[in-house]
């Protein structure tokens, strides 16, 4: 389904932009038998991968480096300069950027629940899940001088079974503060109602950890245990908790 626009909501000095026609939610957080929960206990040390899979690790293509996930290519920078007037006020930039991502006459990004990509990959393929779209929005917003941060929203998890692997889909959106104006939220949510669950700011490392976790979960479900191990280790490195 192609998004056809964004819904802009404003209450007082806050603005929420929701992709009203964009189906789906964000990150597939791997669970096996129970939901993943935040823990304040020290993270366990990653365990060695048993043979025969250990010998396969060297053949796994390394995941993209953390700094590459939010990078903009020269093509993306030129696209921003062409479509968004950098001299306009910040509120106009936020609305223009949401339209740039969602309007079918522009990027018109399609939703794909299983497609997790870097900012550049999402721009190039014009497809991605909500984590991918949030990554792309944050990267472009920061290039435009806007405050843009990842935010996790507690919603009822959407469960999915693939083989003997159980997935729980959770939700992340983008939060920012516009000096002298107020807060805004860019939300790629699958339903018409704005998600109203408890919210928690994510560091870039936590969002990048979810990126690696998604790709590791896809590999695990496909039986690529060496590839899953490589990506899960990357996720733990970026977000130990």
Image (cartoon, helix red, strand yellow):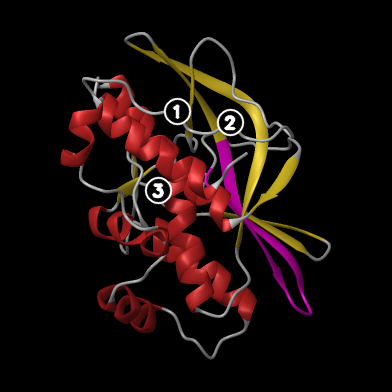
Q: Percent from the top left, x then y, of residue 47?
A: 45, 28
Q: In this rendering, is residue 141 above or below 29?
A: below
Q: Secondary structure at mark 3?
A: loop
Which of the two labelled residues, at mark 3 and mark 1, occupies the earlier sequence position? 3
**Which is nearer the eye, 84 or 127?**
127
Q: Which residue is mark 1?
A: 47
* Principal secondary structure, stretch drawn in magenta: strand
Up-down: is 211 above or below 221?
Answer: below
For marks 3 and 1, give the one nearer the viewer.
1
Q: CA distance from mark 3 to mark 2?
A: 41 Å
Residue 3's disc number: 3
In the picture, the disc for residue 57 is none
**Residue 214 visible somewhere in the drawing:** yes
Dot 2 corresponds to which residue? 44
Magenta highlight on residue 96? no
Q: Secondary structure at mark 1?
A: loop
Comparing labels 3 and 2, the label whose residue is closer to the camera:
2
Residue displayed at 38% across by 28% down: 48
Give the Cα separation between the discs numbered 2 and 1. Answer: 8 Å
Q: Image height check: is 130 above or below 28?
A: below
């Amino acid at each position: 389904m192609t998004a056809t626009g964004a819904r802009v909501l404003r209450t007082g000095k806050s603005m929420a932009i929701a992709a009203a026609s964009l189906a789906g939610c964000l990150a597939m957080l791997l669970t096996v038998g129970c939901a993943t929960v935040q823990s304040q206990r020290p993270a366990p040390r990653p365990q060695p991968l048993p043979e025969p899979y250990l010998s396969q690790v060297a053949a796994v293509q390394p995941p993209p480096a953390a700094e590459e996930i939010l990078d903009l290519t020269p093509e993306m920078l030129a696209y921003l300069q062409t479509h968004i007037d950098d001299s306009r006020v910040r509120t106009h930039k936020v609305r223009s950027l949401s339209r740039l991502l969602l309007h079918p006459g522009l990027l018109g990004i399609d939703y794909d629940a299983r497609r997790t990509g870097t900012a550049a990959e999402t721009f190039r393929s014009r497809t991605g899940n909500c984590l991918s779209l949030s990554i792309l929005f944050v990267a472009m917003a920061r290039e435009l001088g806007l405050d843009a941060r990842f935010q996790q929203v507690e919603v009822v998890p959407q469960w999915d079974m693939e083989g003997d692997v159980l997935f729980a889909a959770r939700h992340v959106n983008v939060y920012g503060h516009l000096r002298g104006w107020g807060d805004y939220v860019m939300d790629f949510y699958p339903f018409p109602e704005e998600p109203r669950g408890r919210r928690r700011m994510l560091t870039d490392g936590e969002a990048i950890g979810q990126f690696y976790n998604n790709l590791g979960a896809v590999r695990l479900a496909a039986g690529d245990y060496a590839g899953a191990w490589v990506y899960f280790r990357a996720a733990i490195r970026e977000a130990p908790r």
